[in-house]
Image (cartoon, rainbow, N blue to C red):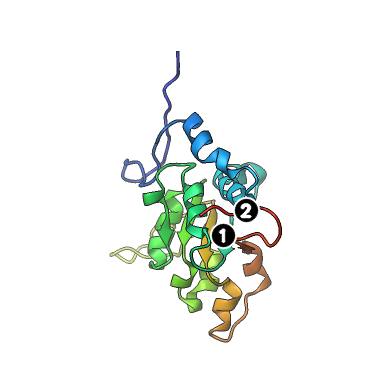
Amino acid sequence: MSKSKVLLTQSLTGDTPAGYEVSGTKPAWGQQIGGLCVGNSRAILAVCAALAPPLLKVVGMEGGGFHLVGPSSCGKTTLLRVAASVSGNPATTIKTLDATASNLEAAAAVCNDGLLILDELGQASPDALGGLVYKLASGIGRGRADQRGEARERKSWRNLFLTTGEVDMSAMLKTIGKKPAAGQELRLVSIPAIPDKGGKNHE
């Protein structure tokens, strides 16, 4: 007799956050997605990035991110979809960086203890990029006041984030005459989407 599967999430509205849903079965995922990751270091990274966030609190570590860098149509978005498939629906789980700071904070808080998936780093403003990396890794939102001028409770989270782009953070900051600080590079590690030697990439 099989046991029913229950997905537990935390949401202020009481609704299941978009993208977090049961879809298919574990054996089907293993056959249709997991099995295809064998021998593909980047696909394995994507899956591990999705599975690791719940362990951050256990080991006492803050969050951080991985940035998959490569030319257009090299399979970067496919890797994001592989990561998103671990927890639900890729169509609604993958976000873009063409959003306000408040929107990104809300997205990070919703996927607390999970993976925040952000496509196209190039859509972020170079001026705001460095601060955004620190914010996502620190897990603390900006302090804000309500309509009465009283302090609102800050959003908080602890997760990993996975991004993609045709260029890395260093190249983006260079366009405005800046270079990334060591702390920023530690919190967002750039990885070639296509391995230099060995491995394979699936579109």
Above or below for 142 versus 49: below
Work out whether mark 2 precedes mark 1 in sequence or the reverse, and give the earlier one.
1
Instruction: Please tell me which residue is depicted at 47% across the width and 66% down the height of the picture.
Output: 120
> Residue 160: x, y in percent?
55, 53
Q: Nearer the viewer, residue 192 or 13?
A: 192
Which residue is outermost to the bottom?
177
The disc at residue 21 is none
The disc at residue 200 is 2
Instruction: Please tell me which residue is depicted at 56% across the width and 60% down the height of the picture.
Output: 138
Q: Is residue 181 left or right of residue 176?
A: right
Measure the alpha-carbon separation of dots 2 and 1: 33 Å
Picture quadrant where residue 100 is located: bottom left
Question: Badge 1 is on which residue?
Answer: 138
Look at the numbered disc 1 and give the secondary structure of its residue.
helix
> Residue 90: x, y in percent?
41, 48
Instruction: Please tell me which residue is depicted at 63% across the width and 41% down the height of the picture.
Output: 58
